[in-house]
Image (cartoon, grey):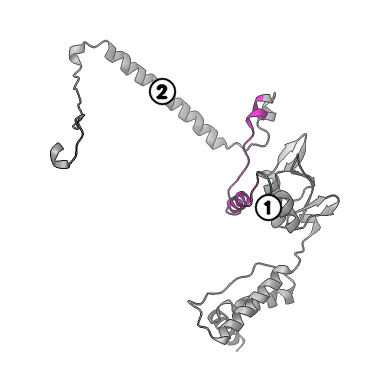
Amino acid sequence: MDEVSENCEETTVDQEGDFDILTFATKERKSGVGGILKRGVKDFEPDGSNRQNELLTESLNTLQDFLQEERSGSSRQICKATWHPAPINKAHITTIHGNHFHNMGHTIKGEIWLYPEEALLLMERGALVIDYDDVPMSIQHAYTMLIREWLTLEKYQVYAYLKRIGYTVIRPLPQDSLQTSTSPQEKLQGTIINPLSSYTALLLSRITFISTSFSRLISNFFKFLPRSDLHEEEINSIVTSESCDTYEIQY
């Protein structure tokens, strides 16, 4: 009987569309475990019934309440940083937890720094707390402070989307820093090098060298041939220099 009642509840929830948001949020509050809301199947079109309007209003209110709840996490898993405003515009990592900095951040004199887009993404993931004037930043405050000047909202949205689907996105090093650097370590600082890509570049350079040498050899060979052995054909355009008004006049 218990299995039959559970199946009936699941069927009812699926048929009612977004009403499973209410069930999910209620279960999450009772268990005390946070998570991402799973939405149900949308109706094909609004039917204007009071029942549908009530379900929609109740679902939206529940979703809003769920999003307004404060997120909590273990302090042992959260990194900490200090925000340095203009002209630096970077976050200095003071406490490191996890493996977030394998493909994010760069080092300056042995210390890890984050660009605004990197810091904001870690804040949205709940993996970083940034202090500004000894006060922890909220997400709203971080958007106001970090998204400005070069980093626009559109650029950050593209960066965050690419990171969430698994891409490694880094800023290119400025040319001035590459020219003024004295050691190879400083030139490669903050850059991720893929061994496969470097091997491919070397292979392509060798292929280019061989093809160039072969073409030069062929051209030198034809230089020693008599002019009579080279069959040169004069190629003329089928269109004369005179202006053509219609297709029939030309053809």
Q: Looking at the picture, tell me which residue is in the foreground, 89 or 62.
A: 89
Q: Looking at the picture, tell me which residue is in the foreground, 97 or 54.
A: 54
| Identity of the residue furthest to the bottom in this view | 1
The image quadrant where one finds the N terminus is bottom right
Q: Is residue 99 visible?
A: no
The image quadrant where one finds the C terminus is top left
Residue beneath the point at 59% across and 84% down: 9
Residue beneath the point at 34% across and 16% down: 217
Relative to 106, is 72 above or below? below
**Secondary structure under badge 2?**
helix
Relative to 105, is 222 above or below? above
Q: x%, y% of residue 11? A: 54, 82
Residue beneath the point at 27% across and 10% down: 224
C-beta proximity under 8 Å, tags 1 and 2: no
Residue beneath the point at 70% across and 52% down: 120
Q: Which residue is mark 2?
A: 210
Relative to 206, is 73 above or below? below
Three-letter code, disc 2: Ile
**Left or right side of 120 for 164:** left
Q: Which residue is mark 1?
A: 121
Q: Is residue 176 magenta?
A: yes
Three-letter code, disc 1: Leu
Q: Which residues are magenta?
A: 150-179
Q: Is residue 100 magenta?
A: no
